[in-house]
Image (tube, rainbow, N blue to C red):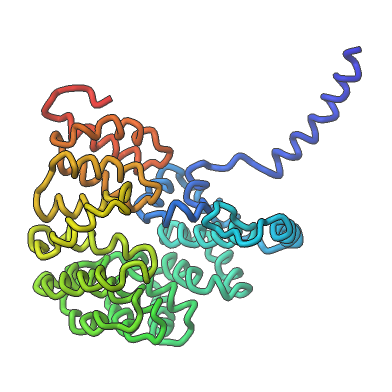
C-alpha cells in the first residue's frame, strides 16, 4: 500500500525542485524596498539605504533582475484576468493592485535602488541602457541611475546639464528629483539644476526644489530663484518653495513661514500627499524661530480628524515650543506606529530627542522595535535607550 505513495513522492520531487528553481528564495531586505503597497506611502531614502546595507552586494543583482523583466504575454494574461474579476469602481486604495501596477512599481523601485547605490551599481549599466532604449516611462529614473553610476564622467555630466536645460519631460523630471542623491555635495554644474526651477513642467520645478532643499545651507545664495515660486500657479510647487527657502536661507525664515501658513490655510488637501508633512518639517527645523506657526499647529492638533496623524504636528510643537507634555508624547507614540513611513520617522526622532519625559511611549516602542524594517527597529531601540537612560532600567 505504501509503494504507490512512495513513487508519487519520488515523481513530485523533481517538480518541486523545478518550482524552487523558477522561484528562488528572495532577499527579504530587497523585497521590502521593492514593495508595491501604495497605501503605506513612499519608502524614505534612509529606510531604503538601511535595507540595502543589510542586504549586502546581492542587492544590485536583484535590481538587475527586475530591470531585465519585460511586459510579456503571461503578465498581459494576468492583467486581463485581473481586469475581468476586479469589482467595478475599485482602486489601488482598496489594496487591490493590478499586475501592471506591481510590475511598474517594482521596476521603478529597482532603478531608485541603483541611484542610491551610486557607483556600486555600475554592473547594472548595460541593463539600464537596454531599458532606456525600450521604455519611455523609465527615461527619468533610468537617466538618473546612469548618472549615479558614473557621476564624475565628463560625458555624463555634460548630458545631465543638457537634459536639465532641455524639453524631455520624463528625463528632466527624474534627473531634477535625484540630482542631490547623485551628487551628494553641490557640484560645479549646480546652475543647471537652478535653471530647471523655471521649467514649464510643474513636477520638474517641484523636484528641483526638493533637490535644492536637500543641500540646505550649502547652496545659500539662490533665494532669488526660489522666491518667485512662492506664488507659482501650481499648488504642488508652492509649499516646496517655502520649505526650500526656509531650509536654505535662514535669513528668509519669516517669509518662508508666512508663505507656508498661507498654503496650509488655502491649499490643504488640493495637492499631493507630502504637503501634509512638509510644513511640520519646516517649522521643526527652524525651531523657536517658527513661533508664528504655533496657533496653526495648535488648531490642527485639536482637530479630531487628525486623530492618529498628529505625530508630525507634535514633533513640530516640541521643536518650536519645547512642549514635552503627555499629549505630545502620546501623539508621537501613535505616530511611531503610523502606516505612513515618513510620519513614523519624525515621530520616533521626536521621542529620541525628548527622552525620559516620554516614558508613556515605552509600551508602543517595544512593539515598534519588532518592525521588519531595519531603520524603524534601530530608531525604536534608540528611543527606548533615550527614554530610560536616567532610570537605569532595561528598556526591554
Give me the residue at 35% from left, 36% from top: 368
Q: Quadrant of the C terminus?
A: top left
> Is 357 rendered above or below residue 101?
above
**For this rendering, which residue is in front, 234 or 34?**
234
Q: Is residue 371 visible?
A: yes
Give me the residue at 69% from left, 56% from top: 82
Q: Residue 81: x and y, percent? A: 74, 56
Residue lying farthest to the top in this orientation: 1
> Is 197 rendered above or below residue 85?
below
Task: Indicate left or right for 298 with 202 as reference.
Answer: left
Residue lying farthest to the front in this orientation: 304
Give me the residue at 40% from left, 47% from top: 339
**For this rendering, which residue is in front, 118 or 174?**
174
Give me the residue at 14% from left, 50% from top: 318
**For this rendering, which residue is in front, 95 or 52?**
95
Q: Residue 283: x and y, percent? A: 17, 61
Please count the marks in the image: 0
Q: Residue 224: x and y, percent? A: 18, 84
> Is 60 rendered above or below residue 206?
above
Q: Residue 369: x and y, percent? A: 34, 34
> Is 176 rendered above or below residue 2?
below
Query: Within the image, what quadrant is residue 127 found in?
Result: bottom right
Task: Indicate left or right for 10 with 86 as reference.
Answer: right
Task: Indicate left or right for 113 with 341 as reference.
Answer: right
Q: Is residue 344 visible?
A: no
Amino acid at each position: 500500500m505504501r509503494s504507490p505513495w512512495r513513487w508519487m513522492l519520488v515523481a513530485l520531487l523533481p517538480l518541486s525542485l523545478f518550482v524552487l528553481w523558477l522561484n528562488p528564495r528572495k532577499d527579504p531586505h530587497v523585497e521590502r524596498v521593492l514593495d508595491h503597497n501604495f497605501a503605506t506611502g513612499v519608502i524614505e531614502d534612509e529606510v531604503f539605504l538601511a535595507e540595502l546595507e543589510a542586504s549586502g552586494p546581492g542587492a544590485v543583482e536583484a535590481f538587475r533582475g527586475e530591470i531585465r523583466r519585460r511586459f510579456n504575454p503571461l503578465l498581459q494574461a494576468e492583467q486581463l484576468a485581473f481586469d475581468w474579476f476586479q469589482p467595478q469602481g475599485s482602486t489601488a486604495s482598496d489594496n487591490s493592485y493590478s499586475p501592471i501596477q506591481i510590475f511598474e512599481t517594482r521596476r521603478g523601485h529597482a532603478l531608485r535602488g541603483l541611484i542610491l547605490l551610486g557607483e556600486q551599481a555600475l554592473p547594472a549599466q548595460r541593463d539600464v541602457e537596454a531599458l532606456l532604449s525600450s521604455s519611455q516611462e523609465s527615461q527619468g529614473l533610468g537617466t538618473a541611475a546612469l548618472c549615479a553610476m558614473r557621476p564624475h564622467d565628463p560625458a555624463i555630466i555634460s548630458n545631465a546639464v543638457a537634459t536639465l536645460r532641455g524639453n524631455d519631460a520624463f528625463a528632466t523630471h527624474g534627473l531634477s528629483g535625484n540630482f542631490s542623491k547623485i551628487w551628494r555635495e553641490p557640484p560645479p554644474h549646480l546652475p543647471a539644476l537652478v535653471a530647471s526651477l523655471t521649467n514649464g513642467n510643474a513636477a520638474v520645478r517641484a523636484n528641483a526644489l526638493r533637490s535644492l532643499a536637500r543641500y540646505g545651507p550649502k547652496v545659500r545664495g539662490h533665494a532669488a530663484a526660489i522666491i518667485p515660486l512662492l506664488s507659482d500657479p501650481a499648488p504642488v510647487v508652492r509649499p516646496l518653495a517655502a520649505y526650500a527657502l526656509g531650509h536654505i536661507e535662514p535669513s528668509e525664515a519669516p517669509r518662508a513661514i508666512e508663505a507656508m501658513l498661507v498654503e496650509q490655510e488655502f491649499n490643504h488637501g488640493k495637492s499631493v500627499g507630502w504637503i501634509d508633512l512638509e510644513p511640520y518639517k519646516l517649522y521643526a527645523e527652524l525651531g523657536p524661530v517658527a513661533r508664528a506657526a504655533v496657533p496653526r499647529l495648535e488648531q490642527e492638533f485639536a482637530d479630531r480628524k487628525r486623530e492618529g496623524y498628529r505625530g508630525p504636528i507634535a514633533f513640530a510643537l516640541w521643536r518650536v515650543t519645547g512642549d514635552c507634555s503627555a499629549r505630545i508624547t502620546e501623539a508621537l507614540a501613535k505616530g511611531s506606529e503610523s502606516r505612513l513611513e515618513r510620519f513614523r520617522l519624525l515621530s520616533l526622532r521626536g521621542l529620541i530627542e525628548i527622552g525620559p519625559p516620554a516614558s508613556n511611549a515605552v509600551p508602543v516602542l517595544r512593539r515598534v522595535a519588532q518592525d521588519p524594517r531595519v531603520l524603524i527597529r534601530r530608531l525604536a531601540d534608540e528611543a527606548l535607550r533615550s527614554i530610560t537612560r536616567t532610570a537605569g532600567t532595561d528598556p526591554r
